[in-house]
Amino acid sequence: MKYRKYGADYILKILVITNLFPYPENETRGIFITCRLEILKNYGIKFDVYGPIPKESNSLKVVRKIIGREGINVHKPFYEFGGIRYKYVFYDKNLFHVFSKNKLKKNKEEKLSKEVATKIYSNNNIDFDIIHAHGMYTPPVGLVAKLLSEKLNIPYVVTCHGSDINLAMPKAAELYNDVLENAGKVIFVSNALLNKAKSLGYSGSNSVVIPNGIEPDLFKPLDKEKIKRELELNKKVVGFVGGLKPIKRANKFSEIFENISSKQEVEFLVVGDGELRENVEKECKQKNLNVKFVGRVPNDEVPYYMNAMDVMILPSRNEGFGSVIIEAQACGVPVVGSSNGGIPEVIGDGGIVVEEGEDFEKRFAEAVVEMLKNPIERGYLRERTLGFSWENIVKREVAVYEEVLKR
């Protein structure tokens, strides 16, 4: 794909910086970034991708081990996945960076961002037209983009994906607002996320909402009964795909599953891994719940497991968008989700949204049973997701680049 610039055909060149990237132990991390870049590559657009990785102090490693949270243990300068080369930028991180608050946190984020920006600048041999930062986590790569924008004299775009706004921005609103207000454009993956940023002081004057997408040729209906037989599942199946961590409400899975099982005989399928997996498995076993845990699987195997489900659940405490919802619906699987973040926008009429509040787990279970008794037609679910193809999403993002470059 070629673009008109200064009266001549021109191939767009993008500097991409992201906190969400794959590495050998977790190739599906940030898969929605990889999917975007694969489409850009097919268009012939040129880009370099950088991901900041902390070099953790020994004391921070000890704390991680105690609390059971994995770090990113990578030492090589890059990693290739899906035909995309992710270049790693290493920066120093210690306990002070983790536990500092307010002004100290702002200073810390600025220092780390300058370190990362300087390293990218010194390693960069390509003339770029625009910078696209995905995520505003530690270090906030939007700030890295802003610093490089000033050095290279080119505009930058920031995409906010969820936890960056919901969890990190409240702790450093002044810094975030400065980065967002000075961007050529800020892309939010849901209206809920945009509204959250506005509630923290962001004007929204340079915002646009563009959701995440799906690969419709990968996420599609398959032979449900055949897959169930292969997985030795004999009843209705309620499933979950994602990280087993508090923000997904995984610590309440056994309670939700128990409530569902008290009303209907079902089996549960949990696809994913995380810090709460051991506890969740233990609790489910203690309650004699029929749960199959398959762990983390490659992205191209996820549709296989989704197609075994009769209902997928997403009871998250917060969610920027919830790509897994449209992936499930593209496979013909309805979703029951919480009312948090962008989940209601994505579910639409393809499932049930359960309002946050008292007796949530009980009411959530009742909604799942209702969906099992009154399923939504698979073809309809599939049809409503086709507009979310990565092809369509990337076209909209490229249009944002063109708008920013015309100014």
Image (cartoon, rainbow, N blue to C red):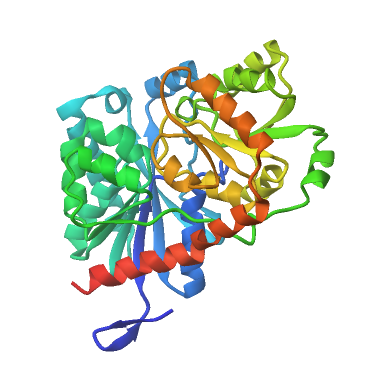
The percent coordinates of residue 115 (x first, y second) are: 26, 44
Instruction: Tell me: 183 left or right of 231.
Output: left
Residue pictured at 60% horizontal, 31% vertical: 368
Q: Is any atom of residue 284 visible in this view?
A: yes
Residue pictured at 42% horizontal, 54% vertical: 211
Front residue of 43/16: it is: 43
Above or below residue 404? Residue 272 is above
The percent coordinates of residue 46 (x first, y second) are: 41, 70
The percent coordinates of residue 346 (x first, y second) are: 47, 47
The quadrant of the picture occupied by the C terminus is: bottom left
Instruction: Tell me: 74 left or right of 167.
Output: right
Instruction: Tell me: 130 left or right of 163.
Output: left
The quadrant of the picture occupied by the N terminus is: bottom left
Give the residue furthest to the top.
286
The percent coordinates of residue 16 (x first, y second) are: 36, 58
Front residue of 388/161: it is: 388
Give the residue furthest to the front.
374
Front residue of 314/146: it is: 314
Q: How many marks?
A: 0
Residue pictured at 68% horizontal, 21% vertical: 263
Give the residue furthest to the bottom.
7
Q: Is any atom of residue 275 visible in this view?
A: no
